[in-house]
Image (tube, rainbow, N blue to C red):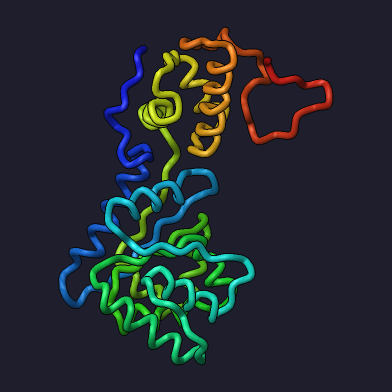
Amino acid sequence: MTNSNQHVNGGLAAVKNVARFLTLVQTLIDRPEGLPGIGCFYGFSGLGKTMASVYAQNMTNAMRIEVGESWTRKTLLQKILVEARIEPRRATIADLTEMAINALSDNWPRPLFIDEADKLADKGMLELVREIYEHSQTPLLLIGEERLPEKLETVERVHNRILEWVPADYCDHDDARMLADLICPNLDLSNELIDHLLETGKGRARSLCINFNRIKERARNHRENAFTMTSFDEDFFFTGKRRGRQARRAA
């Protein structure tokens, strides 16, 4: 089957999770007055949540931060200001909060995406985020792992401001084909091979991307452009499991 780039835009593949994410963003931006403006996009690791958020950032000019394990309240506020293109000066937490609120208000309705939002809950910083949202009314999208909704439930004043809960889903054949078009645009991959990679990677976008990249490297090294299941040894593909000492990847 000949590949096509018709689904590739802005360097990222428009798989179904991207469409779900973009729909959620637009719902937050277009919400009627009086409705809450926080969305939650959640799911298991490897499903492509970050990929979807980066794609949507490029499409909507959103501000986007990814919470780090070492972040403090001050770090969070400084990162928001940097995304709003404001140089954070030395100030108290209260002053930085006010600056962040003003920055988001000035950029309204430009959305703010917060990836790894689980860490906000773990660090007790959800109320700070709620305060920023409440006073700026900026469309705010929290992105995290599958337990993020449960963590948000523990902070009622945040939980009751969620307008939409959207779960990330596993890739299907069409999604996998789009990712192949992105990573291996000039290669012919059989449907049987695509389905095998879906099964091997348990439908996770990250695993698919890793394996398509391996195929691309194989094609470049051996000057091949068509692949089926018989093109590879059993241990060629990434499965997420540690290889045994005797395992060898196909050359």
Task: State whether residue 192 is above or below residue 119.
Answer: above
Q: Residue at x 36, y 12 (%)?
A: 1
How many numbered badges does the structure rendering display?
A: 0
Q: Residue at x 80, y 27 (%)?
A: 244
Residue furthest left as drawn: 32
Residue 76 or 126: which is nearer the viewer?
76
Q: Residue 63, located in which quarter of the rendered image?
A: bottom left
Q: Is residue 103 above or below residue 145?
A: below
Image coordinates for residue 109, horizontal then vertical, percent: 23, 69
Q: What residue lies at 27% left-to-right and 66% top-to-bottom? A: 110
The answer to whether 217 appears left or right of 190 in the picture is right
Image height check: is 249 above or below 160? Answer: above
- Report the side of 170 relative to 20 (left or right): right
Residue closest to the far top: 230
* Residue 162 as seen in the image, left or right of residue 243: left
1 and 118: which one is in front? 1
Residue 31 vs 175, above or below: the answer is below
Whole-percent x and y of residue 194?
Answer: 46, 21
The picture quadrant where one finds residue 29 is bottom left
Q: Position of residue 33 (x, y in %)?
A: 16, 75
Quadrant into which the C terminus falls: top right
Looking at the picture, how far across and down is residue 147, in whole percent?
A: 53, 59
Query: Residue at point 50% right, 28% down?
Result: 198
